[in-house]
Amino acid sequence: MSDYRSLKSVDPVVYQAIADERARQNFGLELIASENFVSRAVLEATGSVLTNKYAEGYPGRRYYGGCEYADVVERLAIDRAKQLFGAEHANVQPHSGTSANMSVYFAVLKPGDKLMGLDLACGGHLTHGHRLSYSGRDFQVVAYGVDRETERIDYDAVEALARAERPKLIVCGASAYSRIIDFARFRAIADQVGALLMADIAHIAGLVAAGLHPSPVPHCHFVTTTTHKTLRGPRGGLVMCQEAFAKEIDRSVFPGIQGGPLMHVIAAKAVALGEAQTEEWRQYQAQIVANAARLAGRLIGLGFRIVSGGTDNHLLLLDVAKAGLTGKVAEKVLEEAGMTVNKNTIPFDPNPPLVASGVRIGVAAVTTRGMKEPEMDQIGDLIAEALRAPEDGAALAGARAKVRELCGRFPLYDALM
Ligand SMILES: *Cc1c(COP(=O)(O)O)cnc(C)c1O
């Protein structure tokens, strides 16, 4: 049957694009803070025959026959998520972080209800109330920011805003914020105004699971996350909540906003959540935090300004305006030098988002490759080398050659090449 022919022979164009992408990942320095490289085991589960299976419903209560193995992997993923985070209830079906958040909003808010989240320009996520996202369209949004001086969340200001606005749901968590988030304080604020509290730990889930960032689980009614950032699983989402909200959340995910779950991805989530229970994995997360601090220190030593003066987690925001660049230019220059980052606004940025004055740099992916403190020093030097010669093609080519050499010492998916 022709169905059993390999991808290479059936569709050489797609095959080649995937091969090229593998080489790009292997020979470039991946510094995008929301990216990571999954294990071979996670990759295998993601590429498995479970992609064929319809399993609408939940384990033991499906709308389709033949779900016995789908049940096995989904039960495993749920149990492992609950165990890893100490949560009362977990739903592993959200296709993405965006759907995970939507499932909470639709479970507890009606159109027009008030939602309070961190401003995108201060590190929040589109789904925390940006006007171009469903979250900003369907709900009335109040945004809190960071303090101009410290560039950290000002909890007193959050409290004052919450008291004035009395939102129904407060969202904490961020996409570009390098400091510890005080979930206990957020809960105290929510309680004062009778709001529910949701933490979105999409970026820091791995750190939370490893005990390297305080957990939101004891303090929040809902905790959402992606599974593909520091958690190092397949691309997807996860919602956890207190038992009292379990039924509403499950109904909100399916049939509320999704149809059939992606069982191959859920199997891969189970694998990743299993990997996260090991001591080796906790050490890996600790190395991520150590690496980010080291890279921030190196860049500061080289004369760069880091937003808020440093980092407590896996990422940092580099203010490139001080170096005479825009985020847009810095992103392009670093790309030419073999380093992938994304431009990012910094607090009170005078530039619009598509230009921005900063770049966001994360170290989870390079840490997955095995890089440690000496390599962070080298990466800091390479970033400086590139940003100081933004128009010098030869200098950028030189940096790129060094990046390639560095990557060559930390091979990725070696056995798959
Ligand atoms: C990445 C991210 C998301 C969205 O995840 P997707 O899977 O891309 O939909 C949601 N919230 C935060 C804080 C994020 O950083």
Image (cartoon, rainbow, N blue to C red):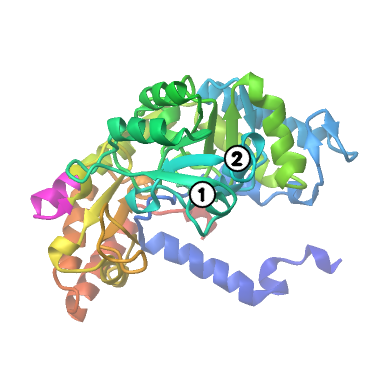
Q: Main secondary structure of the magenta part?
A: helix
Ligand 1 neighbours mark 1 (CB distance < 8 Å): yes
Give the quadrant of residue 70. Answer: top right
Left/right of residue 389 with respect to residue 171 in the rendered view? left
Q: Of residues 62 and 25, which is closer to you in this image?
A: 62
x, y (%) of residue 155?
Answer: 30, 31
Tag 2 secondary structure? helix
Look at label 1 and name its amino acid.
Thr
Q: Secondary structure at mark 1?
A: helix
Quarter of the rendering containing residue 238: top right
User: Which of 323/10 is in front?
Assistant: 323
Look at mark 2 in the image and give the residue it sits on: 105
Res. 200 visible in picture: no
For the residue carrying disc 2, how many other residues have a C-alpha within 10 Å: few (<14), some (14-19), or many (20+)? many
Which region shows up in magenta? 295-305
Tag 2: amino acid: Tyr
Q: Position of residue 399 (x, y in %)?
A: 22, 68
Q: Position of residue 305 (x, y in %)?
A: 15, 52
**Picture residue at 56% right of the left edge, 30% below the top:** 274
On residue 308, which mark appears?
none
